[in-house]
Amino acid sequence: MTTELRRLRNYINGEFRDAADGRTIDVVNPATGEVYATSPLSGQADVDAAMEAAAAAFPAWRDATPAERQRALLKIADAFEERAEDLVAAECENTGKPFGLTRTEEVPPMVDQIRFFAGAARLLEGRSAGEYMEGMTSIVRREPVGVCAQVAPWNYPMMMAVWKFAPALAAGNTVVLKPSDTTPASTVLIAEIIGSVLPKGVFNVVCGDRDTGRMMVEHATPAMASITGSVRAGMQVAESAAKDVKRVHLELGGKAPVVVFEDADVEKAVEDISVAGFFNAGQDCTAATRVLVHESIHDEFVAALAKAAAGTRTGAPGDEDALYGPLNNANQLKQVSGFIDRLPAHAKVEAGGHRVGDKGYFYAPTVVSGLRQDDEIVQNEVFGPVITVQSFRDEEQALEYANGVEYALASSVWTKDHARAMRMSKALDFGCVWINTHIPLVAEMPHGGFKKSGYGKDLSAYGFEDYTRIKHVMTSLG
């Protein structure tokens, strides 16, 4: 007996369509390892059609008043709330995440973020008009950039889609969005929801693989390319966009240092850090992945963290006791396992370090100690439920270790000493510094990094402004 696979489709110019040449990709549920759907493997004809639709829709959407765009986004937010269970079901089949945590930890922030950008649509600001030359008045206009080519990742498919389309649409741009080839289901559902609100062509979804994304970035139509993904992918996008001087927005990898001083509340730090390191199977660029602990409390901390890991559960979406689900795909399971298999002799696996079960891509919560600054697992992004621990002797060495990687997205400091926290937050070379916490995000505050973590901001007014361009208008008073 054969079960018919679900058939996902592109959303172009207000219509759901197969790929023009009929090619498809199998979509796998990572909790089972089984194919449950097919998705279009879009080619040049599909990308061309989506870009043409977005370009045709742009003038009218650009000229809509901010109030009109706000109302549309508020309707989308309301629709997300009404379809919350459908979104959760699609996302959990996409990713294997727990139903309960996806329902409580992802849908409400997404709705809030859409509503934030709905409000931001009416608050675009430039410098005030003025006379900077005799007989002349200058004003500054903020305008949408045009068509935006956007590529979302597989770790938070629907939330990252929101981070991309909400500011772009609020600013008056039109969008062609590509989900990851492993997680298209929730994005196709988002297209259905948005399509009931927006004019045709304003929002388009093109499914496919890396080549599809490359075609989008290389296409002559978009004025901007935005990607959340690996450093390698970001470099390729930047190189490609440079050929026709496209604007680029990159949110790439992370290797967040978590600096725990001797005066920290060890019990609270361990509790919060274990959650921030293992949540979403550690598949988060801001995950508390790299712990640096003062040598005086190192052994105590490692023992407590290993105990917390042993008490952390991974499981299928319906497992109410699971903190996280599987890794997203077979390649990611291989990558995470490879880091542990290649550990140097001086490293010690304190907890986990192995696959869980023989079905799906589950990996045990893992803690590794005894590491040195130049070890591969310290320097490179694992993107799995793996927390490394190093010791440091003083504040200077803590900063040396913390900043001694190529990534610079997020970090945290754990101390009761306010002056030390301020010194560290100034010296840490990361786009975000949390103090005595790790991983909370709010719509009003910017998210984005430095160095190889990319450039441009998501969320906040800064993220909104990234989707605008600035024009100077000068008029004679004569």
Image (cartoon, rainbow, N blue to C red):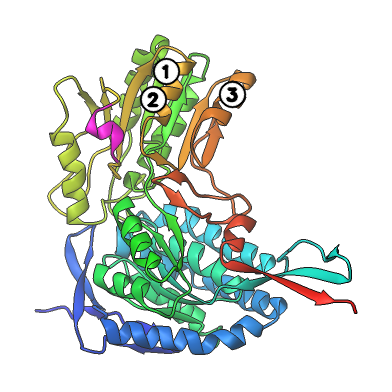
Q: Earlier in the sequence, mark 3 or mark 2?
A: 2
List the residue tagged with mark 3: 423
Identify the element where label 3 is drawn.
Answer: helix
| Other-residue count near label 1 (Cα within 10 Å), few / some / many at <14 / 14–19 / ≥20 | some
Q: Residue at x 51, y 42 (%)?
A: 431
Looking at the rendered image, the quarter that the C terminus falls into is bottom right
Type of residue at label 3?
A: Arg
Q: Residue at x 27, y 80 (%)?
A: 42
Drawn side of residue 200 relative to residue 170, left or right: left
Question: Which span is picked out in magenta?
Answer: 374-380
Between marks 3 and 1, how big is the CA–CA gap? 14 Å
Q: Residue at x 26, y 51 (%)?
A: 326
Where residue 409 sits, quadrant-wise, is top left
Identify the element where label 2 is drawn.
Answer: helix
| Other-residue count near label 2 (Cα within 10 Å), few / some / many at <14 / 14–19 / ≥20 | many
List the residue tagged with mark 1: 397
Residue 321 belongs to magenta span: no
Above or below — where is 260 with respect to 225? above
Do tag 1 and tag 2 residues touch (Cβ < 8 Å)?
A: yes
